[in-house]
């Protein structure tokens, strides 16, 4: 029995993204990772210098793996929008608004709807608010951080990235 179904053999590949962005930590995030790893040396050096450097290496690798695997991706294709773990068909995407400075802070705080889906990173200040029009979804909007909010909004509005 073949593991390939006739549909998967003839179906087109997924649509290529028109916009993608990884919400990587900023430089200070990586400096903190390095500092915490160095702390491993200080904690284990009373046991032995080798134990300190092993702790440094293990802490550094573990923290890098956690940061890399937990960094969310924003991807806009012709048919879908993916923000972190959430995905929705583009037909259910409504108005898109960009917020900077104090307005972005208010969107993340006092103006925030408790039912909104959030993909926010504290080291990225601008946010994009994406209205959700799906009648079966209680989520009124998605709020996501973006280093390139104009490009994300343009891609969602169908004007390219």
Image: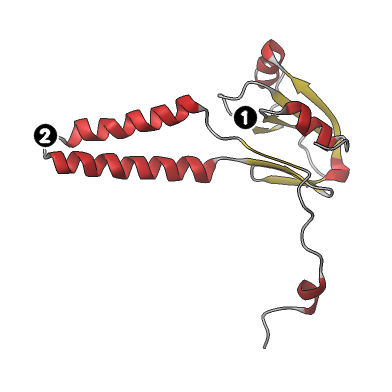
Mark 1 nearby-residue class (10 Å; few <14, some 14–19, many ≥20) = some
Residue at (87, 34) in percent of width and height: 157
Percent position of residue 30, x then y: 44, 31
Q: Is residue 10 visible?
A: yes
Answer with the quarter of the image where residue 110 lies: top right
* Upstream in sequence: badge 2 or badge 1: 2
From the viewer's perspective, tell me whether residue 67 is left or right of residue 88. left
SS label for mark 1: loop
Q: Kindly indicate whether the residue at mark 1 contacts the one at mark 2 (C-beta within 8 angstroms).
A: no
From the viewer's perspective, tell me whether residue 161 is left or right of residue 2. right
From the viewer's perspective, tell me whether residue 1 is left or right of residue 68. right
Q: Using the image, tell me which numbered label, if any, was put on residue 82.
A: none
Residue at (79, 55) in percent of width and height: 15
Percent position of residue 53, x then y: 22, 40
Task: Identify the residue position indicated by label 1 in the image.
Answer: 120
**Color style of the picture:** secondary structure
Q: Is residue 133 visible?
A: no
Real-space Cα separation, disc 2 to disc 1, in angstroms: 40 Å
Quadrant placement of the N terminus: bottom right
Answer with the quarter of the image where residue 73 lies: top right
Is residue 103 depicted above or below 148 in this figure?
A: above
Mark 2 nearby-residue class (10 Å; few <14, some 14–19, many ≥20) = few
SS label for mark 2: loop
* Numbered-mark total: 2
Is residue 3 depicted above or below 129 in this figure?
A: below
Is residue 99 depicted above or below 83 in this figure?
A: above
Q: Using the image, tell me which numbered label, if any, was put on residue 46.
A: 2
């Amino acid at each position: 029995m073949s593991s390939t179904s006739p549909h998967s053999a003839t179906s087109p590949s997924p649509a290529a993204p028109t916009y993608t962005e990884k919400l990587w930590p900023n430089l200070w995030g990586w400096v903190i990772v390095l500092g915490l790893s160095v702390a491993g040396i200080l904690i284990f050096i009373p046991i032995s210098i080798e134990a300190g450097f092993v702790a440094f290496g293990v802490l550094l690798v573990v923290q890098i793996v956690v940061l890399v695997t937990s960094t969310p991706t924003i991807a806009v294709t012709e048919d879908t929008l993916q923000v972190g773990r959430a995905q929705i068909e583009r037909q259910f995407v409504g108005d898109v608004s960009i917020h900077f400075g104090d307005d972005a802070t208010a969107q993340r705080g006092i103006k925030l709807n408790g039912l909104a889906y959030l993909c926010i990173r504290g080291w990225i200040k601008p946010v994009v608010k994406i209205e959700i029009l799906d009648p079966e979804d209680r989520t009124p909007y998605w709020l996501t951080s973006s280093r390139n909010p104009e490009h994300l909004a343009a891609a969602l509005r169908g004007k390219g990235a």
